[in-house]
Image (tube, rainbow, N blue to C red):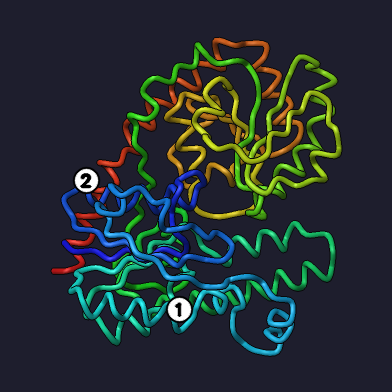
Amino acid sequence: MKILQICHRIPYPAVDGGNIAMMNMALSLVQAGNEVYQFSLNTSRHYIDPAVLPEELKDKLHMTASYIDTKVKAVDAFLNLFSHHSYNMVRFFSMPVANDLSKILDKHKFDIIQLETLYCTPYIETIRKYSKAKIVLRSHNVENIIWQRLALSEKNKIKKSYLNLLAERLKNYELKTLLQVDGIVSITPVDEKIFIELGFKGPIKSIPLGIDLSEYSNTGSAKTKMVLYHLGSMDWLPNREGVDWFMKECWNEIHTNLPEAKLYLAGRDFPKEIKDANYPNVICDGHVANAAEYTSDKQIMIVPLLSGSGMRVKIIQGLAAGKTIISTTIGAEGIEVEHEKNILIANTPHEFKALIKRCYENESWCRQIGENGRALATEKYSLQNTGDLITKFYKNLLK
């Protein structure tokens, strides 16, 4: 099949969850024998100079991109309050991008056009005008759920009201979009169920993230140190909210009971206020160039996610690397894990403290959880598994 993958940003380098999810999907489709063309919005926020893209990757995926300014502008955001449109979506459409896309659609006849996330759906009208391909939304999460959960946990009344408005408009937009696509590929069974409940009646399939397991084949838990870490992009609000909660509600008591425990924090756009708080035995490393290298000597991953939707890429990576993962239920949502078998689930400060204490007191048990996680990743979350599943779904869609 000839497939056009449209991404809401250039998924390179593949160092954060969104980029990994998009790039690995493209590679899994190629591995399954499909011809893939990748067209990306080169956003102002995540701008990538096309010259830095590896030639081999550009050739394999026929990579092209079109610049768009997606900056949040105060005046535009304010004026948007008086419209019925979702400001989240409006920022991702521009006529120059639509024109660049139309040229690709004029030149090539595609079987499937895969839209990575809701942020690419403003171009559906352009696609319908220039192509007869089946349009599939590959959803990384249910966007309105993220904003609903953020609003629920927000204490500031003005912010809460604005977040609720964004969530409501996103929900209305998602409902409208469901009527415009030919199929949906969700990243978790939880999201698949939500889309069906929202009224989607077309073909839909939950297909998990796939990763290149060979990148983790030499990782061994016996070589790692019994230290805690969190690695995640802090420009994503749920990550920032979760880390802030963990530091304020959990860490001081953990340090009091386990003075030897160390916590490493890393991620893009790391907030200054957490660095400046000077929490004891906490090392704030901010942005790291190589995530696999950074985490290679650390055993216990924490995922204190309180909001969000979709599948956490970092958990799949952690499983493959044999890490012991302590996550909230929301963080592990949609991943086929089992508490105290291949992951540890904690939803309250008391539960996080108790499980971290148990890991330090019973190191062999802690490491075994990680080994069980590695076995799960090998069975369920390979590139080959993802590529085979989505290729089968697309072939059925074209019948």
The amino acid type of the residue labelled 2 equals Gln
The x and y percentages for residue 254 are 79, 24
Residue where numbered disc 1 is placed: 122
Position of residue 44 measured from the top left corner of the image (x, y, whole percent): 57, 66
Q: Earlier in the sequence, mark 1 or mark 2?
A: 2
Residue 89, image x, y percentages: 54, 75
Vertical placement of 183 versus 79: above or below?
A: above
Report the front residue among 53 and 12. Answer: 53
The residue that disc 2 covers is 31
Q: Looking at this rendering, what residue extends furthest in the front direction?
A: 51
Q: Secondary structure at mark 1?
A: helix
Q: Is residue 255 left or right of residue 386?
A: right
Residue at image position (55%, 59%) is 46
Q: Secondary structure at mark 2?
A: helix
- Under mark 1, the amino acid is Pro
Judged from this view, the residue extending furthest toward the left is 399
Is residue 89 visible to us here? yes
Quarter-wise, where is residue 106 in the image?
A: bottom left
